[in-house]
Amino acid sequence: MLIDSHAHIQGKEYTGEVAAVIARARAAGVETIVVVGGAGDISSNSEAVELAASFPDVYATVGMHPHDAKDVGDEELKSLKQLAASPKVVAVGETGLDYYYSHSPHETQRRVFGRFIHLARETKLPIVVHERDAALEAAELLGSEGARDLQGVIHCFTGDYDAARRYLDLGFYLSFTGIVTFKNAEALREVVRKVPLERILVETDSPYLTPVPNRGKRNEPAYVRFVAETIASIKNISFEETANATTANARALFHLP
């Protein structure tokens, strides 16, 4: 069985189809889906929590994407803290730093990321981190804000092994998406070869980053199987070993039953 550790199936891309999407995931051997809040606007968080409450094998996280850090103030953080108390919320996030697009000023991103790290500490929840082109600063901020005392995951990891090592040294997991299946992703596959299996999660980041052989279509949690199969091939181990390990890792991180 597999766990899709990061999906956005509460989004408009799945309107009227969520039950069917979840059914297809189950049929593909995906036992649990973690629906991640914070992409687009704050309402995605309440939608994630509502979705998790509606399906026994779905859990939620609450946070705000670094793109939208400029829109996060005291009121938003208060609302998110209240949502974090919901029984099926398993993490704070996604949050972090994105210096590739820089939709929010870097200083604002750093400040808000720090506040979310504090929220994770307050709520005793792990943290889901989005990081792009900011590995050194993200690792330094996590370290200085006491994230060593938390569990967490760097979702959709695409960095080099030096960046991976920094996060692993903090005790974090690394999560890989359909990017590992792309023809031009050999550098990332080399990182996968080096990262210990016990620190790896798999995800789709649905509706984005659809893996080969379905690239070009809308992504969905059923396709996380292609990510796990590719990781098994990269590491020259069985699919079963990969599935068992990544599922155990996700359960440990998110304290899933």
Image (cartoon, rainbow, N blue to C red):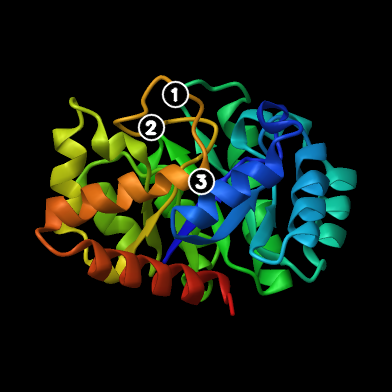
Mark earlier in primary sequence (2, 1): 1
Give me the residue at 74% from left, 58% from top.
52
* The C terminus, quarter of image: bottom right
Q: Residue furthest left?
A: 236
Label 1 neighbour load within 10 Å: few <14, some 14-19, many 20+: few
The 10 Å Cα crowd at callout 2, few under 14, some 14 to 19, many 20 or more, is some
Q: Which residue is mark 2?
A: 133
Residue type at mark 3 is Pro
Report the disc number at residue 64.
none
**Which is closer to the viewer, label 1 or label 3?**
3
Secondary structure beneath disc 1? Answer: loop
Q: Looking at the image, which is closer to me, 107 or 229? A: 229
Q: Quadrant of residue 196?
A: bottom left
Looking at the rendering, in which quadrant would you find the N terminus?
A: bottom left
Q: Which residue is mark 1?
A: 100
Q: Is residue 1 left or right of residue 81?
A: left
Q: Residue sitting at 44 percent across and 59 percent down?
A: 29
Kind of residue sitting beneath label 1: Tyr
Tag 2–tag 1 contact (CB < 8 Å): yes
Left-right relation of 164 to 75: left
Report the Cα–Cα distance between label 3 and label 2: 26 Å
Residue 234 on image: x %, y %: 14, 51
Amino acid marked by disc 2: Asp
> Which residue does the numbered mark 3 point to in the structure image?
221
Q: Residue furthest bottom?
A: 257
Cβ–Cβ under 8 Å for marks 1 and 3? no
* Gap in angstroms between the C-alphas marked 2 and 1: 6 Å
Q: Quadrant of residue 15?
A: top right
Disc 3 packing (10 Å; few <14; some 14–19; many ≥20): many
